[in-house]
Amino acid sequence: MDDKEALNITVLIAGRSYPLKIKASDEHTIRKIVKEVNEKVSSFQLTYSQKDKQDCLSMALLTYAVELQKARQSKIDKDVADKIHHIDSLLNAVVSAS
């Protein structure tokens, strides 16, 4: 990361401060994610009042990891479907030419 575009920020997640060095262009996205994480942690704290903040943070992290894995799998499935469609088109062209 070029120092000209680097930005030092501090974010607060589940009541703890985390200093970050980021690209200036990523600041909005990072702050949005931090807000969503804090909202998810708060939601877990309300739902599971017997759990401590660390447990709620871990559950929020797991939720995001599952969503990321599903998104990755969906992209892989789409890529495979696109390749199969392309191969099918090629096979149809070969069969039609015969």
Image: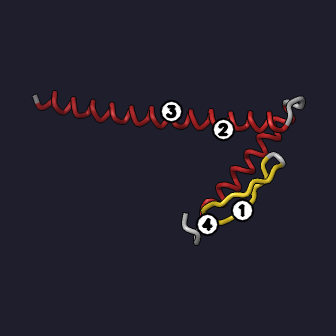
The residue shown at (75%, 59%) is 10
Q: Residues within 10 Å of mark 2 (few under 14, many from 20)?
A: some
The kind of secondary structure element at disc 2 is: helix
Front residue of 16 and 31: 16
Q: Name the residue under label 4.
A: 6
Q: Nearer the viewer, mark 1 or mark 2?
A: 1
Residue type marked 3: Gln
Q: Earlier in the sequence, mark 3 or mark 4?
A: 4
Q: Distance between the residues labelled 1 and 3?
A: 33 Å
The kind of secondary structure element at disc 3 is: helix
User: Could you say where residue 1 lies in the image, as x and y percent from the top left?
Assistant: 55, 63
Residue type marked 2: Tyr
Classify residue 77 as left or right of residue 67.
left
User: Could you say where residue 82 lies in the image, as x and y percent from the top left?
Assistant: 37, 36
Q: Nearer the viewer, mark 1 or mark 3?
A: 1
Find residue 64 and name its label.
2
The residue shown at (75%, 54%) is 18
